[in-house]
Image (cartoon, grey):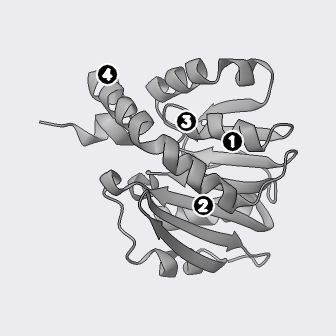
Amino acid sequence: MLDMYRMFVVPEGKSGEKGAEMMVDLGDAMAREAIPFLGLGQKDRVIEIGFGPGIGLETLVKTVSQGTIVGIDPSELMHRLASERNKDSIVSGKITLIKGTVENLPFDDDYFNGAMAMDNMYFWSDPLRGLTELKRVLLPGSKLVCSFTPHSGGSKKGWGKLFERAGYVDFTLLESALGICMVAEASGVSV
């Protein structure tokens, strides 16, 4: 029997290793598709929520080559795997990894130019709080991209209303053979 929590929510042990393999196999193409929707420049600051084995971080370095990339994830295993995958970028200071969750981000208001979350938004303990917290740390007009690969089990129902309640504007849902990308802009208005 699969232990979905230990495999995907806070991966650990053999289940987490198996989940990480699946994330790498299925997530690389989605990361390459989702990142351009952020509209980032080379010197921007971006955060990835639930970075898993670090494939999104690895892809972000190609876009934000002179900026700041921060990843936050609660899993020790994912920290180890992402650190191995992105060793040079971490050593050079391009990527910083933090243990934690989206509901409590240790950053100032209006800090990031963009944020992304791949295949994990439905695992957040409180999606509305997580979206609100992300909006707090995003500069007004910045984009949040949340994506789901077909195998992740993510649904497209109800997200638009949730993003609206959290204070985002211009919510767009984009579908492709790779999955679903939800793109929303952080408004400058507090909720």
Looking at this view, is 103 or 181 the one in front?
181
Which amino acid, by three-letter code, is at mark 2? Val
- Mark 2 or mark 3, which is nearer the start of the sequence? 3
Please tell me which residue is depicted at 52% across the width and 20% down the height of the picture.
Answer: 80
Q: Is residue 103 shown to the viewer in this render?
A: no
Q: Position of residue 185 (x, y in %)?
A: 69, 72
Q: Quadrant of the N terminus?
A: top left
- Checking the image for residue 13, the label placed there is 4
Tag in front: 1 or 2: 1
Image height of 125 relative to 14, above or below: below
Q: Residues within 10 Å of mark 1 (few under 14, many from 20)?
A: many
Q: Residues at badges 3 and 4 in contact (C-beta under 8 Å)?
A: no
Q: Residues at badges 4 and 1 in contact (C-beta under 8 Å)?
A: no
Q: Find disc 3 in the rendering and name its residue.
A: 55
Q: Find disc 2 in the rendering and name its residue.
A: 145
- Mark 4 or mark 3, which is nearer the start of the sequence? 4
Q: Position of residue 72 (x, y in %)?
A: 60, 39
Q: Find disc 1 in the rendering and name its residue.
A: 60
